Image: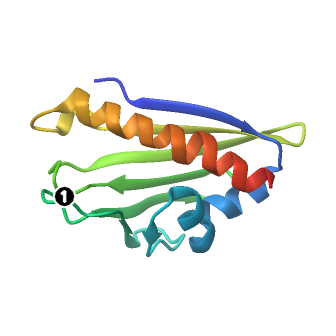
Amino acid sequence: MEPILKKVTINAPANKVWKTLTDPAKVEAWMLMETTFLPQKNKDFTFKAEPNENWDGIFKCSVKEIVENKKLVYTWDTGFINAETIVSFELKEIDKQTEVTLTHSGWEKLAANQQQTKDAHSEGWDIRFVQKLKELVEA
């Protein structure tokens, strides 16, 4: 199954975008969720969303790769999907702007509702990554 792929060009240098991707308070602002994220390799963390009758609202994650101003990779597991997917952010600075590519892969690991779950995550990334991250950095 193809990964979710999102690209956004932000009118800011890579180091400013990186700070917004990795500063816990800023991450909460663009992800629209509480987090225990710290930018440290092998560090486990969570995002906390609104729970519902079928889910506790917790995303369980772990930082797998971190290259300052260039790349951030972490695992992503909502608990109810019972599969660990991978979220990757890659930054490329071009003439005082930064192109950021988000790749969310691993959907084939889901036992059921692969396309529905992928589509819901894709919509969430449009709001959080494409819109909110760009707004926050450029503000």
Q: In the visual, does 38 lie left or right of 110?
A: right
Residue displayed at 33% across by 31% down: 119
Q: Quadrant of the N terminus?
A: top left
Q: In the visual, does 22 lie left or right of 78?
A: right
Label 1 neighbourhood size at 10 Å, few (<14), some (14-19), many (20+)?
Answer: some
Total numbered labels placed on residues in the image: 1
Q: In the visual, does 70 lie left or right of 39?
A: right
Amino acid on which the number 1 mark rests in the picture: Gly
135 vs 48: above or below: above
Q: Quadrant of residue 28?
A: bottom right
Residue displayed at 13% across by 56% down: 54
136 vs 33: above or below: above
> Could you say whether the residue bearing mark 1 is in a helix, strand or loop?
loop
In this view, the residue in front, 138 or 51, is 51
Q: Which residue is mark 1?
A: 79
27 vs 111: above or below: below
Q: In the visual, does 128 lie left or right of 57?
A: right
Q: Quadrant of the C terminus?
A: bottom right
